[in-house]
Image (cartoon, helix red, strand yellow):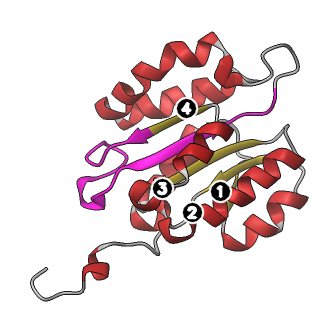
Amino acid sequence: MAGDEFLEHVPLNLNAFKGHLPLRSWMKDALPGRDWVFLDEEGWYGKAFEDSKGKYVWAPPPCVANVCLEQMCEVWHIHPHFSHLFLCPAIMMIDQRKQLTKHSDSMFVVKEGAPIWPTDMLEPMMISLTVPLLPHRLWMMRRSEWVASRKGSLLEMFRSSAANGRSYLRKFWSSLV
């Protein structure tokens, strides 16, 4: 880094999938079903509001994470029966963390060096899971005992192996259907 521009070493313009290419295929395998839509910047404003499938993966670059999160919250308020997965490098997420916590059912941080997020990424990755509103009392999955009992073991699963993390995500989404 001697004499280099600092911002050349901080990928603020790359989303999690462009920063670590195998993550996208890992995520496709981890999510149940093949109807999940991986949104790009154009999809934040169009497809997410118009599409009736309602299973979205939001992966913004850190420099525009706040805009993406605002759009995800708008879609969630308009269509509370949709599922959302939000993942972003945590470098600029300090301001959005509170809002993400309010709108997600489960949120966790994958440290760099985990099997799905290598050490050369330099920053942890935040992952947020938002499920449709429940049709019965509790209304939100985050208030359930199922989520509360698994939050502590989730981080350990991601540290141990990519297969364990993938298995957890599949069980989480499958339990809702």
Q: Secondary structure at mark 1?
A: helix
| 12 sits left or right of 141 in the view | left
- Distance (Cα) linking label 2 and label 3: 7 Å
Any magenta on residue 119? yes
Query: Magenta part of the protein: which range?
Result: 109-133
Identify the mark nearer the N-term, 2 or 3.
2
How many C-alpha atoms fall within 10 Å of the one at disc 4: few (<14), some, or many (≥20)?
some
Percent position of residue 122, x then y: 27, 59
List the residue tagged with mark 2. Answer: 65
The reply to whether callout 1 and callout 2 are in contact (CB within 8 Å) is yes
The amino acid type found where label 2 is placed reads Ala
Identify the mark nearer the N-term, 3 or 4.
3
- Distance (Cα) linking label 2 and label 4: 22 Å
State the residue in front, 69 or 11: 69
List the residue tagged with mark 1. Answer: 69
The amino acid type found where label 4 is placed reads Leu
List the residue tagged with mark 3. Answer: 93
The amino acid type found where label 1 is placed reads Leu
List the residue tagged with mark 4. Answer: 169
Residue at x 59%, y 49% (from the top left corner) = 86
Any magenta on residue 41? no
Residue at x 37%, y 33% (from the top left corner) = 158
Q: Quadrant of the N terminus?
A: bottom left
The reply to whether callout 2 and callout 4 are in contact (CB within 8 Å) is no
- Distance (Cα) linking label 3 and label 1: 10 Å
Q: Secondary structure at mark 3?
A: loop
